[in-house]
Image (cartoon, grey):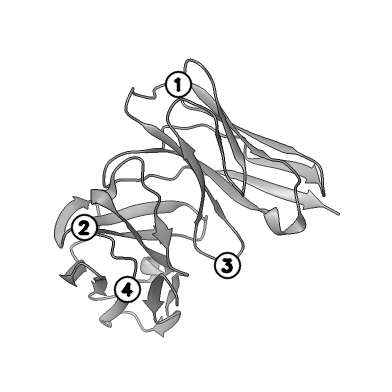
């Protein structure tokens, strides 16, 4: 169902930046790119979304390729609390389908 | 105040029983969803409701029946529970008809165990 491809897992050191990639080669012109994360034993949590331009918020930055076929979620300084599964999603109206996501491990 | 709340948080029941999971959101959203996360951790959308109207009904057995008494509530009733129904069920909501540029808020989940 998911229209995105992400690495199964990634590792990072605490306080270092993390770049989480996502491929979405079949993206349509009206699809928004959303990122969610799921901490252990919790529900998914919204991180950021964008359409064409790069986006920044207090949690992360989203870099979107010019052709929109890929994007990268950037955590500027990973903390232990950022260890989670990160999902890249192409958001449709009334519909949001999750792929397998990337499990991020943060090492102290 | 919890934005999206689900009850109960844990539910253990025997095969063949009927059970309900309740979901309420206090965000004023008009779109609500149910997701199922199985033991392999895949999150699958089950239903989507907009203004109490069913929008998405994935290939979910008829034993699952969502009910939306008002925009703030979307309950999930499950008949004749089976072992394979064991999973974590998440409720979510979003605004503006679930438009593509809106974020969704998720509840903490209900862990259903069928024995």
Q: Which residue lies under the disc numbered 2?
A: B49
Front residue of this view, candidates A98 and B23: B23
* Point 52% across, 24% down: residue: A70
Label 1 residue SS: loop
Crowding at mark 4 (Cα within 10 Å: few <14, some 14-19, many 20+):
many
Among the two numbered marks 3 and 1 on one chain, the one whose residue lies closer to the N terminus = 1
Crowding at mark 3 (Cα within 10 Å: few <14, some 14-19, many 20+):
few
Q: Are marks 4 and 1 on the same chain?
A: no
Q: Which residue lies under the disc numbered 1?
A: A25
Q: Spatial distance from mark 3 to mark 1, Cα to Cα?
A: 31 Å
* Point 15% across, 56% down: residue: B54
Q: Spatial distance from mark 3 to mark 2, Cα to Cα?
A: 25 Å
Q: Are marks 3 and 2 on the same chain?
A: no
Q: Spatial distance from mark 4 to mark 1, Cα to Cα?
A: 35 Å
Q: Which residue lies under the disc numbered 3?
A: A41
Quick check: B39 left or right of A51? right
Chain ID for label 4? B
Q: Spatial distance from mark 4 to mark 2, Cα to Cα?
A: 12 Å
Q: Are marks 1 and 2 in contact (CB under 8 Å)?
A: no
Q: Are marks 4 and 2 on the same chain?
A: yes
Crowding at mark 1 (Cα within 10 Å: few <14, some 14-19, many 20+):
few
């Amino acid at each position: 169902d998911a229209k995105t491809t992400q690495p199964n897992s990634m590792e990072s050191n605490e306080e270092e930046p993390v770049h989480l990639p996502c491929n979405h080669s079949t993206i349509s012109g009206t699809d928004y790119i959303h990122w969610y994360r799921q901490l252990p034993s919790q529900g998914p949590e919204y991180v950021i979304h964008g359409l064409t331009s790069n986006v920044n918020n207090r949690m992360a930055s989203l870099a979107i390729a010019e052709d929109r076929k890929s994007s990268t979620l950037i955590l500027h300084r990973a903390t232990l609390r950022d260890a989670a599964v990160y999902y890249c999603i192409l958001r449709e109206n009334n519909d949001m389908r999750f792929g397998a996501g990337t499990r991020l491990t943060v090492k102290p | 105040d919890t934005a999206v709340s689900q009850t109960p948080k844990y539910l253990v029941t025997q095969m063949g029983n009927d059970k309900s999971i309740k979901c309420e959101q206090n965000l004023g959203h008009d779109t609500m969803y149910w997701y199922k996360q199985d033991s392999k951790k895949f999150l699958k959308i089950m239903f989507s409701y907009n203004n109490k109207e069913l929008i998405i009904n994935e290939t979910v057995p008829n034993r699952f029946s969502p009910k939306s008494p008002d925009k703030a509530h979307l309950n999930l009733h499950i008949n004749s529970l089976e072992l394979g129904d064991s999973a974590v069920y998440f409720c979510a909501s979003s605004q503006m008809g679930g438009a593509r540029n809106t974020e969704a808020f998720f509840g903490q989940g209900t862990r259903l165990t069928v024995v």
